[in-house]
């Protein structure tokens, strides 16, 4: 199964000798069968530009993206569960060539998984990933490095794959000094699964009070390891400030958890429309002003600091600034910071990031 990041274009090309046009059928679903009509089914066709330029292409990313609705992550306890269906989608492509008046299917249908991530320019066109080599869908950018986490928060990692009968997913939580570990096995896996895997078992298990290493391993029916990844989690207790949890969709289309531990600054701004009033009588009431504001409403902004972090947080900050879906402690926000220096320990020594957010709603409820 191929994983497609639909915030970037995904081009389907039809280029067959003798064609005068082409057609593709796009079926998008997250159930047991593909739609062949109605919602989730699209039939797109084109004529060739000329007899010397017969290639036709279709960008299907926007169609698939409509069926993904990232709202907020759902917290989990100490064992894996499945991600909500609206966080990802399955789709199928059938390609046809038009010769004369007849459409003929080319090959067999191709199946994909769509996630709300993006690829970078230097990766080129249609930079899809096979699920075996994708590893962690969320947090892959900091795998094998450290992730600082607040002990009061239940963050997780998304991991997606297509499983055949008798596949096994192994989760190993290892104490940082290697003196203690817990293994969880998920068996009888079949089909495409998008897991929510806890990053740490603390505070339900105090052996991991300082943090842990999480190893995720996938085994086939012959017990051969075919995929693996690791993340180091360091539990950070903050005694002075109240940590703020930032969750957002990263470049891989999975939920990312980032805790801002240090100082925060809250600001409120308001705006309204001023009008000059006409007095109700010549002998007017001097307690009533001559100018009055109407339709006053306000927004709240907040500046947050990560505290001192590792150099690899530059990729986390990059994904945060590029994300379309961001929440602070479960509340929707927009990132007001439009740019940030990506800091290095060589140049900046102690690395701290300050990011400004604006809550994505008015302070006075004016929803109609």
Image: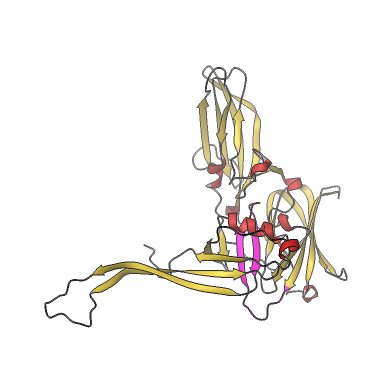
Q: Is residue 166 shown in magenta?
A: no
Q: Quadrant of residue 216?
A: bottom right
Which quadrant: the N terminus?
Answer: top right
Q: How many marks?
A: 0
Most extreme residue toward the front is 347
- Residue 78 seen in render: no
- Position in image of residue 278 (x %, y %): 18, 71
Most extreme residue toward the left is 282
- Position in image of residue 190 (x %, y %): 72, 49
In this view of the protein, which residue sits in the foreground, 136 or 141? 141
Most extreme residue toward the right is 179
Q: Quadrant of residue 365?
A: bottom left
Q: Is residue 249 shown in magenta?
A: yes
In this view of the protein, which residue sits in the foreground, 294 or 230? 294
Q: Which residues are magenta?
A: 236-260
Which quadrant: the C terminus?
Answer: bottom left
Q: Image point 79% across, 68% down: which residue?
A: 212
- Against 203, is 107 above or below? above
Q: Image point 67% across, 42% down: which residue?
A: 122
In this view of the protein, which residue sits in the foreground, 44 or 268? 268
Q: Image point 77% across, 61% down: which residue?
A: 145
In this view of the protein, which residue sits in the foreground, 88 or 275? 275
Classify residue 225 as left or right of residue 274.
Answer: right
- Position in image of residue 363 (x %, y %): 43, 70
- Residue 313 seen in render: yes
């Amino acid at each position: 199964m191929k994983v497609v990041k639909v915030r970037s274009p995904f081009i389907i090309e039809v280029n067959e000798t003798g064609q005068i046009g082409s057609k593709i059928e796009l079926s998008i679903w997250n159930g047991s069968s593909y739609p062949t009509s109605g919602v989730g089914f699209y039939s797109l066709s084109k004529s060739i530009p000329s007899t010397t330029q017969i290639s036709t292409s279709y960008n299907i990313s926007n169609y698939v993206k409509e069926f993904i609705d990232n709202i907020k992550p759902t917290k989990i306890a100490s064992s894996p569960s499945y991600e909500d269906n609206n966080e990802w989608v399955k789709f199928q492509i059938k390609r046809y060539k038009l010769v004369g008046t007849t459409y003929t299917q080319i090959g067999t249908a191709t199946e994909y998984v769509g996630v709300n991530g993006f690829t970078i320019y230097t990766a080129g066109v249609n930079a899809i990933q096979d699920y075996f080599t994708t590893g962690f869908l969320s947090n892959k950018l900091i795998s094998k490095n450290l992730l600082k986490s607040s002990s009061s928060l239940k963050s997780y990692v998304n991991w997606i794959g297509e499983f055949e009968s008798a596949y096994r997913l192994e989760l190993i939580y290892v104490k940082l000094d290697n003196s203690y570990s817990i293994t969880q096995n998920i068996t009888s896996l079949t089909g495409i699964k998008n897991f929510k895997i806890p990053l740490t078992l603390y505070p339900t298990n105090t052996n991991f009070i300082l943090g842990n290493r999480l190893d995720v391993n996938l085994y086939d029916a012959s017990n051969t390891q075919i995929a693996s990844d690791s993340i180091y989690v360091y539990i950070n207790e903050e005694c002075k400030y109240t940590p703020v949890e930032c969750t957002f969709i990263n470049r891989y289309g999975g939920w990312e958890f980032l805790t801002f531990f240090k100082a925060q600054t809250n600001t409120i701004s308001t705006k309204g429309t001023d009008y000059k009033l006409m007095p109700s009588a010549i002998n007017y009431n001097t307690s009533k002003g001559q100018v009055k504001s109407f339709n006053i409403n306000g927004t709240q902004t907040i500046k947050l600091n990560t505290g001192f972090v590792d150099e690899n947080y530059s990729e986390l900050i990059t994904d945060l600034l590029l994300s379309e879906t961001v929440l602070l402690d479960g509340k929707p926000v927009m990132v007001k910071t439009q740019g940030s220096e990506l800091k290095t320990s060589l140049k900046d020594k102690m690395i701290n990031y300050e990011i400004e957010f604006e809550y994505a709603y008015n302070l006075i409820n004016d929803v109609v």
